[in-house]
Amino acid sequence: MPELRKDPVANRWVIISSERAQRPHSFVPQKPEKKHTTFCPFDYGNEHITPNEIFAIRPYGSPKGSPNWTLRVVPNKFPALRIEGDLNKEGEGLYDKMNGIGAHEVIIETPNHDETLSTMSRDRFKDVLFAYRERMIDLKRDVRFRYVLVFKNHGEQAGASLSHSHSQLIALPIVPKRVLEELENCSRYFNFKERCLICDIVRQEIQQGARIVAENTDFIAFCPYAPRFPFEVWLLPKYHQSAYDDIKDDKLENLSIIFQNVLQKIDSVLEEPDYNFVLHTVPFTDIHNNYYHWHFEIIPKLTKVAGFEWGSGFYINPTPPEEAAKYLREI
Amino acid sequence: MPELRKDPVANRWVIISSERAQRPHSFVPQKPEKKHTTFCPFDYGNEHITPNEIFAIRPYGSPKGSPNWTLRVVPNKFPALRIEGDLNKEGEGLYDKMNGIGAHEVIIETPNHDETLSTMSRDRFKDVLFAYRERMIDLKRDVRFRYVLVFKNHGEQAGASLSHSHSQLIALPIVPKRVLEELENCSRYFNFKERCLICDIVRQEIQQGARIVAENTDFIAFCPYAPRFPFEVWLLPKYHQSAYDDIKDDKLENLSIIFQNVLQKIDSVLEEPDYNFVLHTVPFTDIHNNYYHWHFEIIPKLTKVAGFEWGSGFYINPTPPEEAAKYLREI
């Protein structure tokens, strides 16, 4: 059983996935291997290779697990967390731990092996955003979970082990540290100002203009004022909304337009880099509040992060966000 | 002038080093290049290539900047921060910024190009630890600075741009986020228990034994209970001490023995991996307290960190610390 353990000094939970324990030799040598995969478990016809389908977009009447779907959600075959069992929270001296209970799912975004989020049709992209929402709404019913982490690793440098376009979600019995910190900061700001911090940021970004990458009626994409990484982009609604799963059907269209546009801009300016994105939203226990505001953080994988940044939480970014935004805006 | 900017959502300061701004083409392609360097600015005889020496260990009477030193500290030729100027703290709407004032120094650990911390003599290693202390004591006199970040990037994968063995330090007008969080957590624990959290951890680690890597009279090295990375090791004094620069001369010997031993163990078990280490110590404004405890965090560069870990502050570690410690302890 994987474990969730808390570091008392950093106050941070970590998954120790002891069942797939890695021995020293498995780390040596750490040379990037070119994979010549001819077989892909996410292609049409290989539905029996993946664990059983949890959710799919497929023609009415088409049976579960059969081909001709356009999007599928399946459990991760090598999950970091286990879905069955109780949390069994307990102490170990001054340390805290619980069982590694959670869901780890893969959103197969398209049946076409060579399509990416940048190149797929708008409708298909919209379905991906729709699937995120539907899975979150479903997982919220499980009282063991407090948060769903939606993310995408695109390309080998960004941590993807399969090239077929997919994103992932992890339902967790704890709230990730960064989200928790953001909640605290946003809540403190709200107590002081009676306004949502991120709504205020949106207003200032629109007024200043220099960091805006793209914009439509409902959404805005900009390079944040103090980004950790070159060409980091945030994407969020202009209107206040704390939980992503509250997004209305009629907003998904505009979100897919700007999201795909931003990824295409990144592809174009940076020549199709590997990238990651992560959705930040409110925890299950704290929905519909007036101080937090969901957003996607998109990070192209461009720089090798030096170790002191890991160890200190302190970052050096060689590209001012105003310059990055200008390149992305003007392409 | 580089800028320090604060992200109000994450509450984190970032250096934007706008003067060495990187344009998109400089990121493309991001292929690792094999450097065939025959010339090394850190070798004997090339002292004139580096900026002027700040500190050195050299025979009595040997002039500054001449060869025959055994350790040199010089300003970084491409500093992330500038030493001259005022902070000029100011707001920009709801954002906060200040000038990127700070010191960025390189500790050239040895004149021998092919020596590493694992292979150099014990005395030379001790000199490195001595130099860290001396530079911290000196930089503390500058009232603009609040913290000195001492770190090492060993190997290209860990962010080193030169192979000649060296570490770095950055004096900052702010306290790095991770250290700030640790201070808060340790202080909260102290208020509750009247004991130093890390002293308590040391006691429990000694009692449990399973995560210990090495130990001597004064110091202990162990894999932390909830490590973010496989084979992460913490190294710290068994006795309470909040500021590294308070370390006594007679303790440097024992620290160099265990530190070199741990690095040799890592080299041996993981076949000389690239690695980083970072020193966590109290800020200048808050020395000699009874709740914080300096420590080195050593992180071998083994796994590609997937993007969701960046974006969430939530980590999956495939190697339980008890297993990692066993390998390291028994070698």
Image (tube, coloured by chain):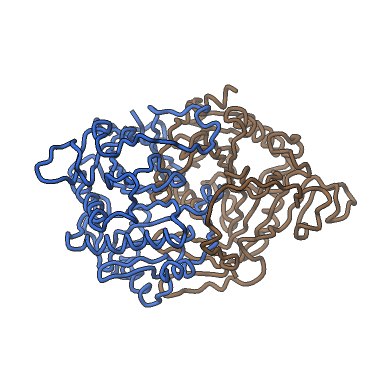
Chain colours: A brown, B blue
Check the image and report above or below for A151 versus B66. below
Q: Is residue B187 visible?
A: no
Q: How many marks?
A: 0
Q: Residue furthest front?
A: B38
Q: Residue furthest bottom?
A: B207
Q: Depth check: B85 or B126 in front?
A: B126
Say whether residue B205 is left or right of residue A305.
left
- Residue A36, given in percent of the width and then of the height, sits at 70, 46
Picture quarter with the C terminus of chain B: bottom left
Q: Depth check: B145 or B223 in front?
A: B223
Check the image and report above or below for B162 versus B229. above
Q: Depth check: B263 or A85 in front?
A: B263
Q: Is residue B69 visible?
A: yes
- Residue B141, given in percent of the width and then of the height, sits at 17, 44
- Residue B219, given in percent of the width and then of the height, sits at 29, 66
Say whether residue B160 is left or right of residue A44.
left
Q: Residue at x 43, y 60 (%)?
A: B232
- Residue A82, given in percent of the width and then of the height, sits at 64, 66
Check the image and report above or below for A208 versus B244. above
Q: Depth check: B81 or B131 in front?
A: B131
Q: Residue at x 83, y 56 (%)?
A: A65
Q: Residue at x 43, y 41 (%)?
A: B8
Q: Residue furthest left?
A: B61
Picture quarter with the N terminus of chain B: top left
Say whether residue A41 is left or right of residue B306.
right
